[in-house]
């Protein structure tokens, strides 16, 4: 990747095109231009047979300049840096700041391309492209342009490896509140791409990231734990805490709504708690009406009732009278 800075101070990461893809694009453009030039030349020879040799030579030179120089310049200007060969190879000519090229850029590239490509059969262009860090030829240097790749292969999404089982829950006491989000993002990107890195480079990056995380948490990394495993375990602990924070509020609300039922209170042990009929309704319905209403209690009837006597004992005097032989007065 090549970092280009635009006029608005925005850094762009572009992949410059290298010599093989650029050479293939130039060959395709030249093949189309030469085929078109041959067709036009045959037409000119057939139509200008009556003219003298000087006129035919002038027309041939004009057709050469127009088709091999003017047409590529016009195509690059109108298509904003994409010729037929560049379209086939997924390339585009842009300015040094990443913007689209204009006529002056295409004109400079085309005129210098006649010397370094057509005149020298591409030898100068190849040498300049190999020497340049961005693969630019002389026409790009003088015009202030760069050929970049538009179709960049997208790498598949990296799989975050889980930490070793013996590290599960080991960092549950770490204070992760001081770790910034950009450091978490760097840890995730490293864990997703560590399989694509050189072993030495990956180990150095893991040590640096582990040191940054340990400095933010205030606790050094355990001895004997690889830095990549330490990062995976700490990242998993953060994900567990985020999941607990996200779903813990819903679980706490459900537990608070259950009330004593969830904790084994009276609602959980009362036999009629789930019944829609209140518990006092059967007692009121069992109380007899008629002559017993307003009658004084019999002597000794309430003396034997203690606080633990059943509530319905005073509501059945007939049964009590039959058992003791005493009947209340009429």
Image (cartoon, rainbow, N blue to C red):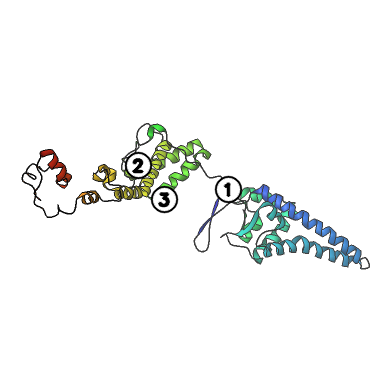
Q: Which mark is residue 214?
A: 2
Graded by Cα atoms within 10 Å as few (under 14), some (14 to 19) or many (20 or more), the crowding at tag 3 reads few
Residue at 27% over, 48% down: 259
Q: Earlier in the sequence, mark 1 or mark 2?
A: 1
Image coordinates for residue 184, horizontal then vertical, percent: 41, 47
CA–CA distance in space, label 3 to label 1: 23 Å
Q: Residue furthest front?
A: 330
Q: Nearer the viewer, residue 116 or 189?
A: 189
Between 120 and 76, the one lying in front of the other is: 76
**Left or right: where 308 falls relative to 192:** left
In front of the other: label 1 or label 2? 1
Left or right position of 160 against 29: left
Q: Which residue is mark 3?
A: 182
Mark-to-mark CA distance, 1 and 2 = 33 Å
Give the Cα separation between the discs numbered 2 and 3. Answer: 15 Å
Disc 2 is placed on an element classified as helix
What residue appears at the point 71 percent right and 64 percent down from the top-left corner? 74
Q: Is residue 308 visible?
A: no
Asked where in the image residue 309 lies, by quadrant, the reply is top left
Q: Are marks 1 and 2 in contact (CB under 8 Å)?
A: no
Residue 317 falls in image quadrant: top left
Local SS, label 3? helix
Asked if residue 40 lies left or right of residue 241, the reply is: right
Where does the image place residue 159, in percent across and percent down from the top left?
50, 41
> Residue beneath label 1, please?
154
């Amino acid at each position: 990747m090549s970092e280009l800075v635009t006029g608005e101070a925005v850094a762009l990461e572009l992949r410059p095109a290298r010599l093989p893809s650029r050479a293939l694009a130039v060959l395709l453009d030249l093949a189309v231009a030469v085929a078109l030039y041959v067709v036009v030349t045959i037409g000119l020879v057939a139509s200008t047979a009556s003219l003298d040799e000087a006129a035919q030579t002038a027309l041939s030179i004009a057709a050469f300049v127009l088709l091999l120089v003017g047409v590529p310049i016009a195509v690059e200007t109108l298509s904003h840096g994409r010729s037929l060969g560049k379209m086939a190879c997924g390339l585009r000519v842009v300015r040094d700041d990443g913007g689209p090229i204009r006529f002056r850029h295409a004109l400079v590239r085309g005129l210098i391309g006649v010397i370094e490509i057509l005149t020298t059969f591409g030898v100068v262009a190849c040498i300049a492209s190999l020497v340049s860090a961005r693969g630019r030829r002389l026409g790009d240097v003088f015009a202030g342009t760069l050929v970049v790749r538009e179709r960049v292969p997208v790498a598949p999404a990296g799989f975050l490896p889980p930490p070793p089982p013996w590290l599960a829950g080991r960092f549950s006491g770490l204070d992760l509140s001081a770790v910034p989000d950009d450091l978490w993002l760097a840890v995730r990107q490293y864990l997703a791409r560590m399989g694509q890195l050189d072993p030495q480079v990956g180990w150095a990056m893991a040590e640096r990231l582990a040191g940054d995380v340990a400095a933010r948490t205030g606790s050094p990394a355990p001895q004997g734990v690889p830095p990549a495993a330490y990062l995976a375990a700490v990242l998993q602990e953060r994900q567990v805490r985020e999941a607990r924070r996200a779903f813990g509020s819903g679980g706490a609300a459900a537990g608070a709504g259950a009330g004593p039922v969830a904790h084994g209170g009276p609602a959980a042990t009362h036999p009629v708690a789930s019944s829609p009929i209140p518990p006092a309704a059967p007692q009121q319905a069992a109380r007899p009406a008629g002559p017993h209403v307003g009658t004084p209690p019999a002597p000794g009837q309430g003396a034997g009732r203690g606080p633990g006597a059943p509530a319905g004992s005073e509501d059945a005097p007939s049964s009590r009278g039959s058992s003791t032989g005493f009947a209340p007065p009429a």
